[in-house]
Image (cartoon, helix red, strand yellow):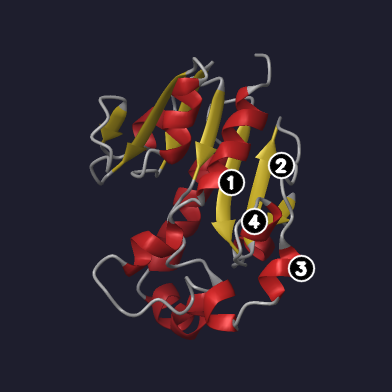
């Protein structure tokens, strides 16, 4: 399948899909961390108009996630939130029969619609919790691969919510939004295994 992984500079999902034999490309305004030749460093908007067999999208959540609700009034006033909503919706309405759009819990659940699924890293073997919403078109719900919630709940809150407690740094936003490895595995194996 010809697959676009939008707003991904880590290459985690793209590299797994390519390993399965798909013609998968990532796109982000940032360079690929893995220096892959299969990464397009550019604005993704023109690519969303092209036909793709599948689109996996991780649009920025900074102006949409409830974790930033204290700044929503300012973000609405200066237009940042409207731009983020419009960018999210470009992915929802992209030229593909199969679409997964990922974002944390935020305003898109009311602005657009409730997500098809909410996943947590502990459902895929990571000893962490971080609610993540998936909006799906032409794709099934992502199946849990290894639920370790019981073990995760025994950890102190700063361990099981490690990303929330990350100290300020230049890479904090990037690190908080990076796809967990075993979730990337599940996306590639389950969605990459679908016949076009």
Mark 4–mark 1 distance (CA, rounded to whole Å): 13 Å
- Residue found 60% across the figure and 25% down from its top: 192
Give how far apart the Cα atoms at labels 1 and 3 are: 18 Å
Could you tell me how many numbered marks the image carries? 4
In the picture of the structure, the residue carrying the numbered disc 4 is: 133
- Is label 1 or label 3 in front? 3
Question: Which label sits in the foreground, 3 or 2?
Answer: 3
Judged from the image, the secondary structure of the residue bearing numbered disc 1 is helix
In the image, taking residue 95 as reference, residue 195 lies left or right, namely right
Single out the mark in the foreground, 2 or 1: 1
Measured from the top left, where is residue 14 in percent x and y?
44, 32
Q: Give the number of the disc on residue 150.
A: 3
> Which of disc 1 and disc 4 is earlier in sequence?
4
Of the 4 image quadrants, the one containing the C terminus is: top right
| Residue at image mark 1 | 183
User: Can you say whether 172 is above or below 87 in the image?
Assistant: below
The residue that mark 2 highlights is 142
Does 121 sit above or below residue 96?
A: below
Q: Position of residue 78 (x, y in %)?
A: 35, 73
Q: Secondary structure beneath disc 4?
A: strand
- Please state, as top left, top right, bottom left or bottom right, where the N terminus lies in the image: top right
Whichever of callouts 1 and 3 sits on the residue coming sooner in the sequence is: 3
Residue for point 23% across, 35% down: 35
User: Judging from the image, what secondary structure is the residue with disc 3 in?
Assistant: helix
Residue 38: x and y, percent?
31, 25
Badge 2 element: loop
């Amino acid at each position: 399948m010809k697959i676009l992984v939008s707003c991904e500079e880590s290459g985690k999902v793209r590299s797994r899909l390519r390993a399965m034999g798909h013609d998968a490309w990532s796109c982000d305004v940032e360079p690929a961390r893995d220096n892959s030749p299969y990464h397009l460093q550019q604005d993704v908007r023109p690519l969303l108009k092209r036909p793709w067999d599948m689109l996996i999208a991780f649009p920025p959540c900074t102006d949409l996630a409830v974790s930033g609700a204290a700044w929503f009034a300012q973000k609405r006033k200066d237009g940042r939130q409207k731009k983020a909503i419009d960018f999210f919706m470009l992915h929802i309405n992209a030229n593909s029969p199969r679409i997964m759009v990922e974002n944390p819990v935020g305003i898109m659940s009311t602005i657009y619609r409730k997500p098809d699924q909410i996943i947590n890293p502990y459902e895929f073997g990571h000893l962490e919790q971080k609610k993540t919403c998936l909006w799906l078109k032409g794709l099934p719900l992502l199946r849990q691969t290894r639920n370790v919630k019981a073990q995760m709940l025994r950890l102190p809150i700063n361990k099981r919510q490690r990303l929330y407690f990350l100290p300020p740094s230049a890479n904090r936003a990037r690190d908080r939004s990076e796809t967990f490895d075993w979730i990337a595995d599940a996306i590639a194996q389950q969605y990459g295994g679908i016949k076009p």
